Amino acid sequence: MRFVFSPPADVAAGLLSLPWADPLESWTDDRIVEIRQRGISRHVVRFVADSGRVYALKEIDERLARREYRLLRELADLGIPAVHVLGIVVDRGTDLDAILVTEFLDFSSSYRALFADHRSGPPTAQLLDALVELLVRLHLAGFYWGDCSLSNTLFRRDAGTLKAYLVDAETAELHPALSGGKRSDDVERAFERVGGELFDLQAGGLLPDEIDPVEVAEEVSARYAALWRELTHEEVMRPDEQRYRIGERLRRLNELGFDAEEVELITVGDEVRLRLSTRVGEPGHHRWLLYGRVGLLVEENQARALLNDIASFRGYLEQKEGRPVPEAEAANRWLAEEYAPVIAAIPAHLRGRLAPAEIFYEILEHRWYLSEAAGRDVGTTVASRSYFADILPAVPGELADPVSVALGDEPAPAGPA
């Protein structure tokens, strides 16, 4: 038996004592846990909780396991959102396939779980936007997915939006560049699979009546084409406007989370043609900025909202104390006086429903609505109490962090209010 794990391999040391010589389906180890948000898989997949983490184990042909292991590592090197792969276990014995080991994505949700959240209507548009953005990122990097679907994706909430993560690279291919035919094939497969998944939801009574699975699936192609065009189309401009037009185009790319690898200007008569070679942007400018200031590692849009709140808090401090407040001081006081007390005040029975940063973001939004209604700023303390009493309890249990649930950290449901 051989274990092939990527460094640092010590994080997986506790997994070595699992019964690898037995068929995965027959395991009865105490560390086996059930993940209620798991997707549908054509292979045997089990989940193991060890040393404060949850791992997904997939039994699969060795050749495919080695290939997927390599592709997931390459996706990580490119900064493309995907599950983190730890390694593979091979040579397990006669007639036993290899096992691919990945780390389960904390605070992620399946598309089925997201449709169970009725607080803000069906998440159809957000799901499609997140899935299409992920597919475009893969294509720009030369990746053909081959099995783009909602089931092969996990979603994290990010300040009112969703971010998609690839969880299955079994059919993926890496090329120096992706042809138009390969891209079209991927998009067509996505249309078929998304439509089928929504029909399954409909058959199970989980899809709102007003949603047509075919119309939604057709949106995949339209949204993909629109985003791909925005990122890659050739733009024609006059020489006297090229400076600001180029800057404008590059800002749009950055706002979408992409960068220009190369800018090419071609003069044809009185026209200038702008061609951009687009690549996936450096992941998370705002999240790394926030991490550097207060040590919180969150999603990109969450980070943007928290940085804005820090800036607002700094202005409040300067007005209140009548002196300039250094940025570092404001950030640290915000963490101690605003963020930390709110997170500590989350009722025990509601912890794990959403990521802490998402809860704080929703409280900021709730504070704004309460302040509008009151005609004055109600403050974070009042807003958080109202949110914990009226909003957070409405988050379905299906959205609770699967890792917290698997590790036994999710408290029992609350009784009647």
Image: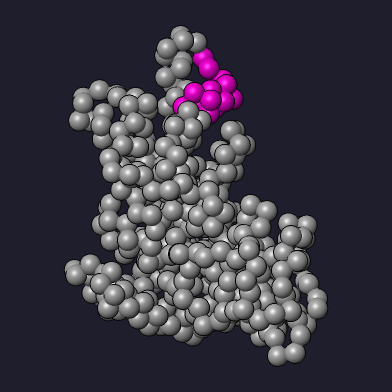
33 inside magenta stretch: no
Residue occupying the point 34% across, 31% down: 385
Q: Say whether residue 122 is left or right of residue 310.
A: left
Q: Quadrant of the N terminus?
A: bottom right
Residue pushed farthest bottom? 95
What count of labels does the image hold?
Answer: 0
Residue 84 position in % (x across, y down) = 63, 62
Q: Say whether residue 92 is left or right of residue 324.
A: right
327 inside magenta stretch: yes
The residue nearer to you, when weighing 258 against 277, is: 258
Residue 288 position in % (x across, y down) = 59, 43
Residue 322 seen anywhere in this rendered image of the structure: yes
Q: Is residue 372 above or below residue 27?
A: above
- Magenta stretch prevailing secondary structure: helix
Q: Quadrant of the C terminus?
A: top left
Q: Is residue 317 above or below residue 322?
A: below
Residue pushed farthest right? 1
Residue occupying the point 62% across, 78% down: 26
Q: Is residue 178 above or below residue 357?
A: below
The residue nearer to you, when weighing 73 against 96, is: 96
Residue 370 position in % (x across, y down) = 25, 31
Residue occupying the point 32% across, 78% down: 200
Q: Which residues are magenta?
A: 324-338
Q: Quadrant of residue 132?
A: bottom left
Residue 9 position in % (x across, y down) = 77, 60
The residue nearer to you, when weighing 350 against 108, is: 350
The residue nearer to you, when weighing 61 against 402, is: 402
**What colouring method underlies this structural image?**
one colour
Q: Is residue 218 above or below residue 413?
A: below
Residue occupying the point 25% across, 72% down: 205
Residue 273 seen anywhere in this rendered image of the structure: no
